[in-house]
Image: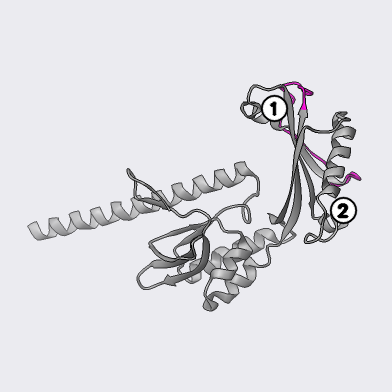
Amino acid sequence: MLTLEDNPIEIYNNSTVKQIAFNQSAKSALISISTPDDSNVEIEAEYIFSSLPANSLAKVLPKEYSDLSNVLNEIKTVNMAVVNLEFDGKLMAADSGFGFLVPSCEDSKILGIIYDSCVTPEFNAGQDITRLTVMIGGEWFEEVLGDVDTVDEQKPLDIALEAVAKYLKINFDPLRYIVTINRNCIPQYYLGHQRRLQTIDELIKKYSMNMTLMGASYQGFSVPDCIHFAKLSAESYANAIKGVASQTHSQSSQQKDQIKQ
């Protein structure tokens, strides 16, 4: 646990949320988590901002919210292989851009390539190198790579090298590489997604749950989307608190005036 001395903030790293229990009468919630040393910690909160994936949140809600859990479980996820490559030499112009995504109508085994050397040149550490990230799988993971539990890392590596040769004309071996298989990492916004979000919002209001959902499962799965909607959620909550405080102050002033009279 990391405590920031100047702020009442506690950060539990590598910990798992086990359950979230809501006390509707007290307008609070009790969050049970398990830390890396197998300690169980309970945190009482006035409000929750949950960025858990939808299916993970569904698992930690009490049974009385099963209808909400069922809708959350309708938001499916897919697997993706990520291949990080590092090549000797500066093989791309510094202003080549962020990278590209391959349109689904094209016959390609990859989802896209990120030009890491261009996006984060500071991580080149002053060396003449080219860093790339190749993304493979998604909706077509099993079709391209097979079973997520048995896939050999050589297969996505070969696909990645074929892709950089085809699209970027880089035809030699990398200095180093890392292959990562990410399970259930990309939410899929299938037909009816907005309807699901509306139902989720209605159920949260129905049960008077003091919770806002954010993160990749809901309003956009890109990093900018997640940041944008997290900011909007925080601002909305802050404005609501100000409104309550302002209303309370107004009522207190009225009471004082009545006493004076």
Classify residue 125 by image quadrant: top right
Residue nearer the viewer, 159 or 48:
159
Mark 2 Cα-neighbour bin, 10 Å: few <14, some 14–19, many ≥20: some
Label pair 2/1, CB-CB below 8 angstroms: no
Q: Which residue is mark 1?
A: 118
Q: Residue furthest bottom?
A: 64
Q: What is the CA distance from the residue labelled 2 to the residue labelled 1?
A: 28 Å
Q: Position of residue 84 (x, y in %)?
A: 74, 39
Tag 2: amino acid:
Val
What segment carries the magenta color? 88-108
Give the residue at x 74% y 57%.
Answer: 78
> Residue 183 lies in magenta, yes or no?
no
Relative to 166, say whether 135 is above or below. Answer: below
Mark 1 Cα-neighbour bin, 10 Å: few <14, some 14–19, many ≥20: many
Tag 1: amino acid:
Cys
Q: Which residue is mark 2?
A: 144
Residue nearer the viewer, 212 or 108:
108
> Residue 96 lies in magenta, yes or no?
yes
